[in-house]
Image (cartoon, rainbow, N blue to C red):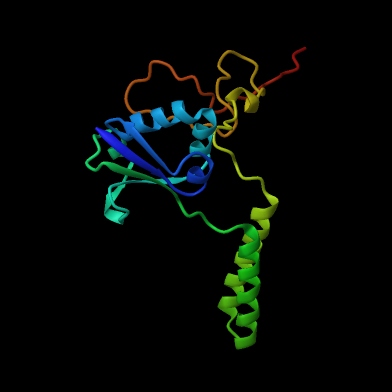
Amino acid sequence: MIHTIKLHGFLGQKYAKTVKLDADNVFQIMSALVSRFGPGFKEDVRVNSWHVISGPQRPENALDEQDLAHQLKHKTLHLVPAVQGGSGAVRVIVGVVLMVVGAYFGQGWLVQIGASLALGGVVEMLSKPPTAGARQNQDDNASHIYNSAVNVTSQGGAIPRIYGRVQRCSSVVIATDFSSDEA
């Protein structure tokens, strides 16, 4: 079935506002869009959040992850950018305004909320946000306290909870090194 795909936001400005494709589900449509526009399109979609809407733009027509593989009911598909939170500077400004208003009217709780917003905004501006796909290799964070073949977990790794019989367990939970001075 021929579907009309409407790209909203910066995707529509950068690539095309409307594209017609012959596909059955969202996965096929996205694959066709990537092959048509190149790997830059895939990266733009991957690093941002999107709403996928089948049919008229109404909340009940939004697709969730389970619906992406199913056959589409409508001929029109919208790819709309998701609204994301404000920057740290906005949080700092709103926090300072709340602190001033709370101090003026003698509302201590409002001053506390404003202070936490302002401090959270400062932390957000100072910290680097994680990027999608920038996973850290487990070997980069490995602990070399135990020098043996059983050292397969990194510091802070999960400790498995085992019920029943155990055939093998490769996570070191605790180890000590005893040395003695024998004469």
- Residue 161: image quadrant is top left
Residue 28 percent across, percent down from the top left: 34, 29
Residue 111 percent across, percent down from the top left: 61, 76
In the displayed structure, 70 sits above or below 82; it is above
- Residue 17: image quadrant is top left
Q: Nearer the viewer, residue 80 or 170?
A: 80
Residue in the image at 64% along x and 83% along y: 103
For the question of whether residue 59 can be seen, the reply is yes
For residue 156, side relative to residue 60 (left or right)? right
Residue 3 percent across, percent down from the top left: 30, 37
- Position of the N terminus, as image quadrant, is top left
For residue 183, side relative to residue 2 (left or right)? right
In the displayed structure, 109 sits above or below 90; it is below
Label total for image: 0
Q: Nearer the viewer, residue 137 or 45?
A: 45
Q: Nearer the viewer, residue 79 or 60?
A: 79
- Residue 91: image quadrant is bottom right
Residue in the image at 74% along x and 14% along y: 182
For the question of whether residue 161 can be seen, the reply is no
Q: Which residue in the rendered view is the most extreme toward the bottom? A: 105
Q: Which residue in the rendered view is the most extreme toward the left? A: 73
Residue in the image at 57% along x and 34% along y: 156
Residue in the image at 53% along x and 57% along y: 85
Q: Which residue in the rendered view is the most extreme toward the right? A: 183
- Position of the C terminus, as image quadrant, is top right
In the displayed structure, 98 sits above or below 119; it is below
